[in-house]
Each structure stands twice: as structure tokens, then as C-alpha cells.
Amino acid sequence: AQSVTQLGSHVSVSEGALVLLRCNYSSSVPPYLFWYVQYPNQGLQLLLKYTSAATLVKGINGFEAEFKKSETSFHLTKPSAHMSDAAEYFCAVSPPNSGNTPLVFGKGTRLSVIA
Amino acid sequence: GAVVSQHPSRVICKSGTSVKIECRSLDFQATTMFWYRQFPKQSLMLMATSNEGSKATYEQGVEKDKFLINHASLTLSTLTVTSAHPEDSSFYICSARDKKAGTSPNEQFFGPGTRLTVL
């Protein structure tokens, strides 16, 4: 069974500071990994995804994440936080060729950006 | 990119009535759609997996007679909350997988969600 752990239910950073949201996964096979963002009262929007190609993945809005197999991690980073980055972030995992199997989500991390 | 719509975006109903929520994939065909429920400040809770032309697979603890799911076509799935009660009030989100998964393997495209309030 696959699972995802997001360390820190709430992260607060100053505007312009580095954003680091942590995600560790558990999987018996090399997984596919995703980061989604959710703004209040909205659905989830894909930020980026890892599907066994390059280990450093660049996404939208200046975010990127690095797949580290040795650490079973897929942490999300952004060099400089913007007020508009304040939202809920979800890490998700699935096995390759999962067919009808849904993504397994972490509990989410709420990012606050302080002016 | 792939777009998923939900209708309505917000609904308020009286206790005891039934409410239908539609989930549509607008520019792709979805063999599989998923329905989630989300409580305030919490993660998504998978309710059921819906495949076109077959019965939905419900997660443990989800009442299939209360949450009726129909996936009649490759672009439409509906969730009907029957005899709704205040405890059914929540944010319901659907997602869909593209039948042509080549460029987006395993990715789920999410709808904007439906806020249900039962009085």
C-alpha cells in the first residue's frame, strides 16, 4: 500500500522568503508523485508531477520539487514566497500504470505568507 | 489543459430533499471519475470510484444508497445525495482521469467543487 506524509500541517513564511513544504512517501514500487494546490472554496490545481523522468521537476508559479529515492521524499520549494501563494498544498502518490486506482493524498499543508 | 466542471457550485437545500451534483469532463473522455468529500481544513476523503457504464466502487463507510453515483457517459458522472441531512453538509469535489493517459499518466483533473449546505 502506498502512503504520503506531509510534515507540518501549517507553514508560515515571510513574503520573499524560501518556501519548503515537505512530503515523504511510502511505496513498494517507484511511484508517480504529484503536488496540488487548493485555494479557498476551489478544487485542486496541479502544480507539478514526477513520472519517472527528470528527478527535478519544475511546475507552475515558480514551484519545483525534487524526487529523492534515497530519502523517499518529494519536497516542494519556491525561492521567494508571494502573498498569492497562501493556500493549501497536497502531496499525492500513485503507482505507475495505476488504472482505476485513485491518487493517495497527504493531509495537506496550509501555507501562510506574512507581509 | 483538461477541464472538469461541476454544477452547481453551491446549493442550499432543506433536510430530507435530494440533491444532484454533476461532474463533466469538458475536453476529454474520462473512463474513471472520482468523488471526494472535504471537511473544513481537512484533506480530501475519497467516497467512490466511478467507471463509465458500470457500478461505482464505494469506500468503506460510505453509504451507497445515500450517495448515488451514476457514470452514464465518458464525460458525465453524477452524485445524488438522497434524503440529505445537515451532517451531509460539506464540500464535494470530483476528479477525472483522461482515457488517453499517455501525456498525463495517473493524473487526476479536478472540478471546482460543490458546496452543499443542508438546513
Image: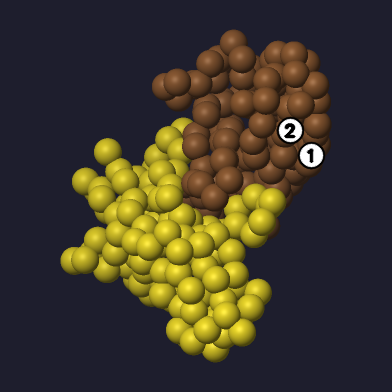
Chain colours: A yellow, B brown
The amino acid type found where label 2 is placed reads Thr
Q: Residue B97, how many percent across, how many down?
A: 57, 41
Judging depth in this view, the residue of B66 and A3 nearest the camera is B66
Say what secondary structure mark 1 lies in.
strand
- Position of residue B60 relative to residue B94, above or below, is above
Residue B10's mark?
Answer: 1
**Residue B76 image-quadrant placement:** top right
Q: In this view, does B3 lie to the left or right of A9?
A: right
Q: Residue at x 64, y 59 (%)?
A: A39
Q: Residue A10, how many percent across, how many down?
A: 45, 64
**Label 2 Cα neighbours within 10 Å, binned few <14 / some 14-19 / many ≥20:** some
Numbered disc total = 2
Q: In which quarter of the image is the C terminus of chain B?
A: top right
Q: Residue at x 53, y 16 (%)?
A: B63
Q: Residue A18, how many percent across, how many down?
A: 45, 84
Q: Is residue A95 visible?
A: yes
Judging depth in this view, the residue of A101 and A4 nearest the camera is A4
